[in-house]
Image: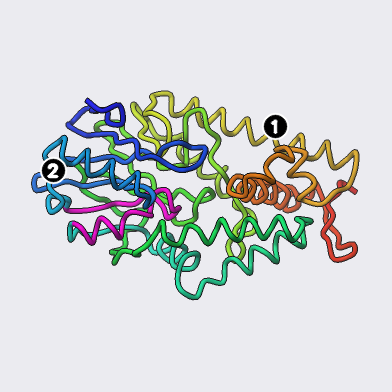
Amino acid sequence: MMNEVTTLANGWLQVKIPLPFSLKWINSYVIPEQEGYTIIDPGLRTVEAIELWDKVLQQYNIQWNSIARIVLTHQHPDHYGLAGYMQMKSGCSVYISKRSHQYALRLWGEESDYPAALRELYLEHGMPAHVMDSIADNLASFIEKVSPHPKVSYIEAGESIMLGGVSWVLIDAPGHAFGGLCFYQIEWGWMICGDQVLPRITPNVSVVPGEERDPLAAFLQSLEELKSYEVKLALPGHRDPFTDFQGRIIELQAHHARRLKGMVEQLSEQPRNAFDLCESLFGGRLRDNPHNLRFAMSETLAHLFHLEEQGLVHSKRIDDLLIFSTE
């Protein structure tokens, strides 16, 4: 068998779809149905990903027209990108939450306002213009990787969906991606958790212009809610399926508590803007990696805005820049 494919219980397949950045791969799950197959999160549209899918389908004797549905946990391009291409090849239905779909169209639609909004946000928080230019170029490179956009049907938190012959509850999973969904099967104790809970990786929590100001609060609340589910096997978007779901949530909560505490300590020593703090936290080498720098900058802002909402730090405008301090 190929190293990219693992057979799970109930005939499910975990397929590791390659990614052209540091995450290395995304998990797509192939689910046998009474008629055809469901695919969870098909991956980013790249030549390498399409070649792997062709190889997997041939290996397992799955025809394109046997793909009945694609179900998306959320809208980020590494999950969403191939949905339209696969729909074009198979004629399948594509299911996603309405808010996730609106996000995808806003970021990569023909009249996207997102690059301009992100530029305004980053520049007022201290990012040099030439560094922002590299991020804008990186953002633009994703348009072809999510094209064509699929025609979709909406699914929402609180509903249920049949996957693999059994019923799954859809759970709201905001913070990493507003509109994101987790899927829980109570009898099996399985949780399809997308990027909301990941083993050995901390899910990115980013400020997105035009969305909630405090995504970290939503993410931490979501983690607390997810901790109440009895999970025997978690199927994440990245890395391998794992069993200690509650333990991993506790680790993620502790990580953010440490990050928040450390940021307060740094700002108590010296007021600074968000970009300076970002480089202090993540390292100046990220200037050479605009993809990762965007995640780092938006995550820094998410923590700062959370601290500001709690009254632990304050910002004021000095010479067109917003400066954070504990005073």
Q: Which residue is mark 1?
A: 258
Q: How many numbered badges does the structure rendering display?
A: 2
Percent x, y for residue 301?
Answer: 69, 51
Instruction: Report the side of 259 relative to 218 (left or right).
Output: right
Residue at the spot 88% in from the left edge and 40% down from the top edge: 268
Q: Which residue is mark 2?
A: 62
Q: Quadrant of the N terminus?
A: top left
Percent x, y for residue 40?
Answer: 30, 46
Front-lying residue, 300 or 26:
26
Residue at the spot 13% in from the left edge and 54% down from the top edge: 65
SS state under label 2: loop
Please determine whether, in this image, residue 137 is positioned above or below residue 163. below
Magenta region, residue range? 68-89
The colour scheme used here is rainbow
Q: Nearer the viewer, mark 2 or mark 1?
A: 2
Residue at the spot 85% in from the left edge and 48% down from the top edge: 272
Q: Earlier in the sequence, mark 2 or mark 1?
A: 2
Few, some or many C-alpha atoms within 10 Å of disc 1 (few <14, some 14-19, many ≥20)? few
Disc sitting over residue 220 in the figure: none
Front-lying residue, 259 or 47:
47
Instruction: Report the side of 49 relative to 210 (left or right).
Output: left
The answer to whether residue 34 is magenta is no
Instruction: Report the side of 101 relative to 84 (left or right).
Output: right
Percent x, y for residue 257?
Answer: 67, 34
* Three-letter code for the amino acid on which mark 1 is drawn: Arg
